[in-house]
Amino acid sequence: SDPRLMAILSHAEVQSIEGHWLRGHVLRIVINPWFDRLMSFLILANAVCMGIEADRDNYSESVAEFLSTSEDFFLTMFILELVCQLTALGPPFLATWWGAFDTLIVAIGVFAQWLGPAVLQE
């Protein structure tokens, strides 16, 4: 088994997950090195867009709209990543430092991007 999994789950828990159809498939995706690479690329691309957006007053309306749409895209992808991690690993994922940090960052993003503006408009 993957050493990262063994740090979160026992051998019996990994076998139980692998025996479950949905969780087993999602687990194979989550532990695939390409999944980490994709998420790392998305984090980097999001950081670049955030850096560009910091100077948004100097951009046209279409560029500002593209940056806003890209922020929605990235946040949606990070939510999907979190859902995949929780589906594959269950609550023990949240007990890890990375799982708790990831959840906190996504929650802050959801509030800042979607909930906060909706509440402030009312």
Image (spheres, rainbow, N blue to C red):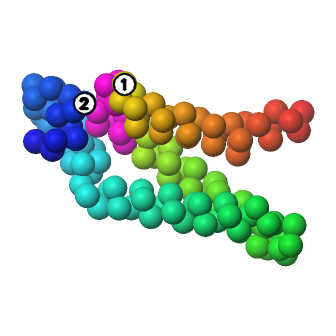
- Residue under pointer 1: 95
Q: Residue at x 59, y 60 (%)?
A: 47
Where the N terminus falls, by quadrant?
top left
Callout 2: helix, strand or loop? helix
The segment highlighted magenta reads 84-93
* Residue 21 visible in image: no
The answer to whether 84 appears left or right of 114 in the picture is left
Tell me the quarter of the picture where residue 112 sits: top right
Q: Secondary structure at mark 1?
A: helix
Q: Looking at the image, is 55 positioned above or below residue 75? A: below
C-beta proximity under 8 Å, tags 2 and 1: yes
Q: Main secondary structure of the magenta part?
A: helix
In the picture, measured across the screen, residue 59 lies left or right of residue 24, that is right
Image spot of residue 61 (x, y percent): 84, 71
| Front-lying residue, 107 or 4 | 4
Vertical side of 69 occupied by 88: above or below: above
Q: Residue at x 68, y 37 (%)?
A: 111
For the residue marked with disc 1, what is the amino acid?
Answer: Ala
